[in-house]
Amino acid sequence: MKEIYRHYGSQKFDPKAFIPISNKMFSNKPSGGLWACPTIDVDISWDRWSRDNEFCTDKLKEYFDFKLKRGAKILIIKNIKDLNKLPRVNTEDPEIKSILEMDSLNSNIDFEELSKNYDGMMVWMYRSKDIDTTKRLFDGMYYRMYGWDVDTLLVFNPDIVEVIE
């Protein structure tokens, strides 16, 4: 069975409204893309996390489900080793560079560069079979990806989305 993903905040996918990925300085998340979470075999769903933390629960009413089209090239991040292999935002400004180097809560991922080679990125915060989720807080991934609160798919390329009617 193909993985099914859910995007909250709208009832249907509109490829014309898709915003291309762009880096945000001093953030471990980019602007744009399509954010979703898996719906099958998840320890902590976005729905559950949002309700438990009273975060954007009004947006849980609207959602759509989708699959990825065959051949979609998805980068899988399941641990700190995978995260450390990703390209970083490069800046020549010495002041910004020193801040980025000191900021342990910022992964400095170059999402724009990743989007040239991949259709999306899956970050397994909880599901990965090779991690003990009780140790996630101490391996660095939790802090470097702070705000990626659940297992998350970030779609870079809208052409890979296959909406489930």
Image (cartoon, helix red, strand yellow):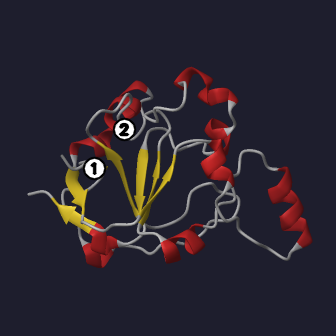
Which quadrant of the structure image shows residue 92?
A: bottom right
55 relative to 135 in the view: left or right: left
107 relative to 155 in the view: left or right: right
Q: Distance between the residues labelled 2 and 1?
A: 11 Å
Q: Position of residue 14 (x, y in %)?
A: 24, 71
- Compared with 5, 121 (above or below) is below
**Depth order, front residue of 35/133:** 133
Q: Which mark is residue 46?
A: 2
Q: Which mark is residue 83?
A: none
Mark 2 nearby-residue class (10 Å; few <14, some 14–19, many ≥20): many
140 relative to 52 in the view: left or right: right
Residue occupying image coordinates x 84% and y 66%: 96
Mark 1 nearby-residue class (10 Å; few <14, some 14–19, many ≥20): many
Q: Earlier in the sequence, mark 2 or mark 1?
A: 1
Q: Position of residue 138 (x, y in %)?
A: 69, 28
- Compared with 17, 99 (above or below) is above
Which quadrant of the structure image shows residue 87?
A: bottom right
At numbered mark 2, what does the secondary structure look like: helix, strand or loop?
A: helix
Q: Name the residue under label 1.
A: 5
Q: Where is residue 144 in the image (x, y as percent from the top left)?
A: 67, 45
Q: Position of residue 106 (x, y in %)?
A: 70, 51
**Depth order, front residue of 22/74:** 74
**Depth order, front residue of 127/14:** 127
User: Which image quarter is the C terminus in?
Assistant: bottom left
Residue occupying image coordinates x 57% and y 20%: 134
The amino acid on which the numbered mark 1 sits, given as a three-letter code, is Tyr
The amino acid on which the numbered mark 2 sits, given as a three-letter code, is Trp
Residue occupying image coordinates x 62% and y 65%: 24
